Image (cartoon, rainbow, N blue to C red):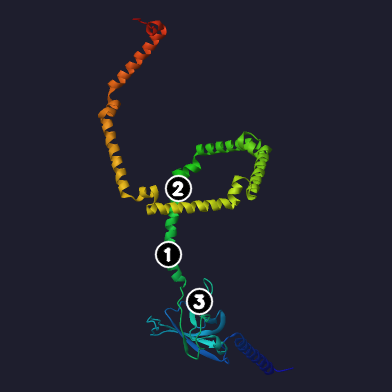
Amino acid sequence: MPSQKQLRWAQLRVGLTVVFAVVVLAFLIFLMSGTTGLFTPTLRLVSYTESAGGLRNGAPVRLQSVDIGNVESIRIVNHQSPTGTSTPVEIVMKVNAKFQPFVHTDSQMLLSTAGVLGETFIDIDSTQAKGGVVANNSELPSKEVPDIQDVVRSSQSTLQNVTVLVNRLDRIVSAVEDQKGSVGKLIYDKQLYNNLNSSVAQVNGMLNDINNGQGSLGKLITDDSMYTRANATIDKLNTIADNVNNGNGTIGKLIHDPSLYDNANQTLAKANQLMDGINKGEGGLGKFAKDPEFAKKLDLLVTNLSTITAELQAGKGSAGKLLKDPSLYDNADQMIVESRNLVTAIRKDPKTYLSIKLHVF
């Protein structure tokens, strides 16, 4: 039977073995899971930004969303960017050397967040990078992206506008509920509902009459004779179109007979010749259009006619008195009356007026 001392020594050896195994296991797990282990070759990259944005030491460094390293340190320094902007936050990153060919000197460093409430990490964007491959202690340009606070600040004006809009909608809904305005009356006016219901009933009655073949529309829809007549009319129109295409009839000859075009062309040519002659002052129409003496004579004639018309309107001369003197009309009317009376007297006693006396010497 082992002594007490031997048992304690056996228990100590077991405990030391377990502790050593746990340490070795943790070390192996660290080497297998970490991107930058103790024996993994790494390179340091530096970037400067205006704000750390909640970034912490040990935060992941990712290239196109793939883990390639961790944040080594974050500190405040006195640094000016090439554009003159103050970027006081220095971020030192430790990156696995095997990803060095994928990181370029013009790759951009962005602070991103895993989800809305997730931790902040560094995301290196090389999609548009065309520079050379980075070396140890190379500086990466940073790209500022708005964080959640910037989004909230920028959305305050939008929220205020939404609040104003909601208040306006609330007033509109209140006005509608109080039966104000056209929309309120449209919703709550019972008379409007009754009128609409009556109109719908009338429309239904009209549709029923049409379906039953009553009225003009009903006959137009249900009467087959209308279709037959329309079909016959279409056949006649097709016949007319065929005749026109075949050159039959006046319209067909008008479309297909080339002599009409030739005659029209000749007529236009003669009309052009006539217009050229008129423009040159040839013939009666040409002299009428171009001769200034004829124009003067025509103007004198119009002036004389205007003078004569004015004198006639004034009652001057024989023709003027003939138009304006009422005594001529009275005398002529009296003569017609007397002539009519004479004819009447002759008809009554023709012997008195038509007797012939012969005197023999």
Relative placement, left or right, of 125 versus 4 is left
Q: CA distance from mark 2 to mark 1?
A: 27 Å
Where is residue 220, by image quadrant? top right
Outermost residue, right side: 1
Residue hosting label 2: 174
Q: Badge 2 local density, few (<14 within 10 Å), some, or many (20+)? A: few
Callout 2 amino acid: Ser
Relative placement, left or right, of 53 versus 209 is left
One can see residue 178 in this view: no
Give the quadrant of the C terminus: top left
Residue 325 location (% of width, % of height): 27, 24
Callout 1 amino acid: Gln
Is the residue 72 above or below the residue 179 in the image? Answer: below
Secondary structure at badge 3 equals strand
Q: Badge 1 local density, few (<14 within 10 Å), some, or many (20+)? A: few
Q: Badge 3 local density, few (<14 within 10 Å), some, or many (20+)? A: many
Residue 194 location (% of width, % of height): 53, 36
Residue at 28% x, 22% y: name it: 326
Q: CA distance from mark 1 to mark 3?
A: 22 Å
Callout 3 amino acid: Ser
